[in-house]
Image (cartoon, rainbow, N blue to C red):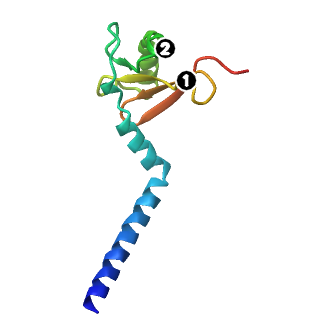
Amino acid sequence: MRRLFDWVVIAALLVLIVTGAGAALSLPTVRHIISSLWNLPDRLPALPANGQVHYQPGAEDDARVVAALLPDAITRIEAVHGRRFAYPVTVGVRDSGGLCGCKQTRVCRSRWCHILRTGESDA
């Protein structure tokens, strides 16, 4: 009888853990944090002209465009917030590979921010 009780307690704890993990993963914030940690742009090769811009192989042209726009974008963001960034901004440019049927490049800034930039509209 004692052994059965032990198994029931263990099963109940496992059910609670799995249910809690499922509930946590259903929240968009948790999924975004996990996704940003999984896809850190620091692991990608950097542009020689601008070390802040990292790119996935195949997205070099888009990375050059982002590198050209980056200084002005950083200046505008810092002006709106009224202070400078605490750390240098690292930007990753990823090629979606046409998975969605359009030409999209995923641009993600390390530390939780994901932005989609569309290269050409489908219209």
Q: Report the residue that reaches farthest toward the bottom.
A: 1
In the rendered image, the quadrant that contains the C terminus is top right
Mark 2 neighbour density, 10 Å: few (under 14) some (14–19) many (20 or more): many
Q: Is residue 66 above or below residue 40?
A: above
Residue 46 position, x and y percent, is 33, 16
Residue 77 position, x and y percent, is 45, 23
Q: Which mark is residue 102?
A: none
* Residue drawn where x is 26% and y is 86% of the image: 3
How much space separates mark 1 and mark 2, taking CA atoms? Answer: 10 Å
Q: What residue is disc 1 on?
A: 117
Q: Is residue 53 above or below residue 113?
A: above
Left or right: residue 107 versus residue 87 is right
**Label 1 is placed on what type of residue?**
Arg
Q: Which mark is residue 62?
A: 2
In front of the other: 81 or 13: 13
Which circle, 1 or 2, is nearer the viewer? 2
Q: Is residue 71 above or below residue 27?
A: above
